[in-house]
Image: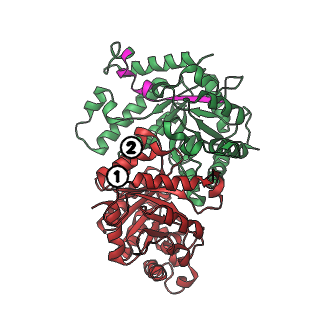
Chain colours: A red, B green
Amino acid sequence: MHFADRLAHAVKATNSITCVGLDPRKDQLPAPLRESVSVDSPDAWAAAYTQFCNEIIDVVAGKVPCVKPQAAFFEQLGPAGMVALGEVIQHARRANLIVITDGKRNDIGSTATAYADGYLGHESPWGGDSLTVSPYLGRDSLEPFVEVCDRRLAGIFVLVKTSNPGGGLLQDRQTDGQTVYQRVAELVTELNANRIADCGYGPVGSVVGATYPEQLAAMRAAMKTSWILVPGFGAQGGNADDVKVALDEKGLGAVVNNSRHIIFAHARKQYAGRFGDARWQEAVAAAVAEMNDQLRP
Amino acid sequence: MHFADRLAHAVKATNSITCVGLDPRKDQLPAPLRESVSVDSPDAWAAAYTQFCNEIIDVVAGKVPCVKPQAAFFEQLGPAGMVALGEVIQHARRANLIVITDGKRNDIGSTATAYADGYLGHESPWGGDSLTVSPYLGRDSLEPFVEVCDRRLAGIFVLVKTSNPGGGLLQDRQTDGQTVYQRVAELVTELNANRIADCGYGPVGSVVGATYPEQLAAMRAAMKTSWILVPGFGAQGGNADDVKVALDEKGLGAVVNNSRHIIFAHARKQYAGRFGDARWQEAVAAAVAEMNDQLRP
């Protein structure tokens, strides 16, 4: 099944548009996992990251359509962390979760193909369903990814408009009335042409931050064939009404990522007393249920 | 010693501005290495990549200032490839080569810090001297990298103007007479302010392709404090006169990358007959000597 249809199917089956971001950080792990690291070595932390992410996956499987492992936190540990990333992706796949590997990779020509070949599709070495990519290098840097998407029934999410305060420096620059991010949105639509799956969407998704609701609504209108991955919900400030504008009339077309407020829910005021570090998995379950409720129509 | 000074020192010590790109590809490895892979597994290929790159390092050490491992080709193999990347970086370090890890990483806030923490500096898990980064996310996505550069005496190379045909789609867009890549160049200079090392350069380098010589000269003038990494020489079409415009009056300020024409020199017409696959290391040595000669004033 095409990536876009797999994602649509997963959203319907779980009645959820929540994407759980897997961003393991040493100092925020629940105490039992932190304390399991007896030697401060990359291998020991990598084992703790794997356990942490896999337990989250076990909690959220069947309740959300997808997870988004953030490559940076695994790479921070060096090679041992990358082995852990591979294990986490495989565990998510076995739990029938769609995997969006968040690597923001980008390069030109055959180098872009190498990234695509490594990360895209179940038969790839990393084995995820999709990858986030950066557009600075232009159309011919994205086409190799799209070609691999075609062969592997995989997807990509192109950075269009990001949720950080400084994102506008380049993205908001206007030429003849069109901003850079609007040009990228147009490119996303161009790349999806002739690649539309049954659900109405193509393999080329986009990333549009939740901190700019008007822009998110405009991007929904501009990219009718692109699944939108919306970061910036929760810890970064966006609320439910802000992000629902990214959905189409069928409730499809967007997934909303939350990392810290879900995976580190044990440390949030509302859950710390009830569950605390010892029952951190229950805090994750409660936080996912809360987010799913907030995002249901 | 600051990264910029280490690079200046290495250029002077080797009397070379050649950067050797380490881009291992299965089907282009010399026959003896391809044939050493008896089982088609990621581990077996990763071992062949490590041997290939380490032997290149042994050949070019002392003859060039730096090497640039391309992360994509290692990541293409999955986790086993990333272990190989770590081994190659360590081997280059032991050979006193400056390592520019080519990952074109980018993200926001603490996620950017995670990449920086993983890749920048000799005490980092990957252990390279510097990393290529993409600017699409804006200034606040680069600052975390620069802060880690300060602490670790490391460097970054920001994509400014790339050498691919489609690079202009976003990079050449003008606003009030200033292109996107010119704005990025300005940002590079801003980030280097108050960070200038003895050699006159700061930790924030830039990537400017050799296929646009006029732009390369203009970028040299615009970014007086930035080491420029120039790709696109050799296989991608740039020649020696095209790239020398990136140097300052002391012959510093730029390194010129060549991957395929050096590491796969055994397959080039001029070397195939003389060395062939069996003596591929001698072909690498000859190709490096040729490039060094071409680039000397």
The residue marked by circle 2 belongs to what chain? Answer: A
Q: Is residue B213 above or below residue A98?
A: above
| Image coords of residue B33 (percent x, y) | 30, 30
The residue marked by circle 1 belongs to what chain? Answer: A
Q: Is residue A232 above or below residue B240?
A: below
Residue A123 visible in rendering: yes
Q: Residue at the location (68% across, 31% down)?
A: B218
The circle on residue A149 is: 1
| Image coords of residue B39 (percent x, y) | 23, 40
Q: Residue at the location (50% across, 65% down)?
A: A221
Nearer to the camera, A230 or B175: B175
Nearer to the camera, B260 or A35: B260
The circle on residue A42 is: none
N-terminal of the two: label 1 or label 2? 2
Nearer to the camera, B167 or A20: B167
The reply to whether label 1 and label 2 mark residues of one chain is yes
Task: Give the amino acid type for the residue marked by disc 1 in the picture.
Answer: Cys
User: Between marks 1 and 2, how big is the CA–CA gap?
Assistant: 11 Å
Q: Which range of residues does the magenta coloring cover? A: B253-269
The circle on residue A113 is: 2
Q: Is residue A34 above or below residue B85?
A: below
Question: Is residue A81 one of those drawn in magenta?
Answer: no
Quadrant of image for the N terminus of chain B: top right
| Image coords of residue A46 (percent x, y) | 43, 59
| Image coords of residue A157 (percent x, y) | 45, 57
How many neighbours does mark 1 have within 10 angstroms: few (below 14), some (14-19), or many (20 or more)?
Answer: many
Please tell me whether mark 2 sits on a helix, a strand or a loop: helix
Q: Is residue B106 above or below residue B284?
A: below
Query: Image quadrant of residue B242?
Result: top right
Task: Give the amino acid type for the residue marked by disc 2 in the picture.
Answer: Thr
